[in-house]
Image: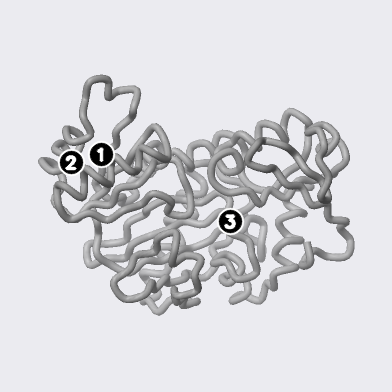
Amino acid sequence: MNHLSDKYIGVDVLLDRAGEWHMNGFSKKMPQVLNSIDVAFNALHGEFGEDGKAQQIFESFNIPYTGSRIIPSSLAMKKHMARDLFSRAGIKVPRAMFFKKDDMFGIDVSECAKKVFDSISPLWVVKPASTGSSVGVKICGSFGELVEAIDNAFQYGDTVLVEEYIRGREVTCGILEDFRGQSAYALPVVEIVPPQGKFFDYDVKYDGTTREICPADFDNSIKREIENITKKAHDILGCCHYSRADFIVSPRGVYLLEINTLPGLTSESLFPKAARAVGLEFPQLLDHILQLALR
C-alpha cells in the first residue's frame, strides 16, 4: 500500500490459513470486509486467490476487482487444460501427459511413470497441474526419480502434469491492457537466468540468486514472436487487465509453458520490472491496474 497513489485509501485485508478474514489487523466477517471497500486489489496467489474462487466471492458481492474473471483464472490454474487450448490454437507447447487421482483407482504411481517413460524421452518436468510459484516442480532423468516426483506432486493436488524437458533460455512476457493506445500491450521480454545448475524453482525465485535481463537479448524476430504468442494466449483464455506468460526459447522454437493471470506485483517482481523498462513506474502501474478494475 506504500506505493499507492494518495487518491486511494488502502485497506489491508488478510485471509489466514484457517479461512478467517482480517481487516487492518482485526478479525472481521467476510461481508463486513467486502461491504466496506470500493475495489479489491487481488494480490493472492495459488489456490483460492488465483484459481477463480476469490473471484467468485468478489462477483457475488458486486465488488470490482483486479485481474482476470472466474473462468480464465480457473483455466490458467489448470495447466493441463490451458495447454490443450493453446495447442489447439497452434501454439507450441511441450509434449506432455497428465494423471488424475480420480482415474487412478487400483493404479500405482509407477504405472503412470511407465506410461511417461514409454512415450516421452527424458528429461521430464513433473509438476502439480494447479499450483503456482513452481511449487512441487521437479526435473527428472531416471525412472526412479520420475516415480518419486509424480508421487510428490500428488501431495499438492489431484492432477499431475509431466512434460518433456526442453533445453533453452527461459523468458517471460507480460500483457497490460489499454496501455499506449493498445488494447493488449506487450511489455518487454525478460530473460530469466537461474544460478548455474539450477532451474527457476520456488527457492531461486525468491532467494535473490536469479538474474533477470530486461529487455532480453534476442533478435527482434524472436521478441516479436514471444510478444505475439503472449497476446494470443491472453486472448485465448479471456484474461483481464494484465497477465504474464512463461516460455522456453530453444533451437526447436519458442514453447509456451504457462500463463499467470496474477503475476507477482512486488516492486521487484518480473512484471513491474518490465513495466519500468517502458517508463511505467510501480505506483503508476498499480494505479493503471486499479483504474482498469474500476471501469
Please state the horizontal and vertical placement of residue 256, each as a whole percent of the image. 37, 54
Q: Is residue 22 above or below residue 291?
A: above
Disc 1 to disc 3, C-alpha distance:
32 Å
In the image shown, does 249 or 19 lie closer to the viewer? 19
User: Contact (CB < 8 A) between labels 1 and 2?
Assistant: yes
What's the image's color scheme? one colour
> Which numbered circle lies on residue 116?
2
Q: Quadrant of residue 246?
A: bottom left
Query: Which residue occupies 14% across, 47% down?
Result: 143
Query: Disc 1 marks which residue?
Result: 97
What amino acid is at disc 1? Met
- Would residue 140 be visible to someone looking at this image? yes
Mark nearer the viewer, 1 or 3: 1
> Which numbered circle lies on residue 184?
3
| Element under disc 2 | helix
Query: Which residue occupies 64% across, 47% down?
Result: 67
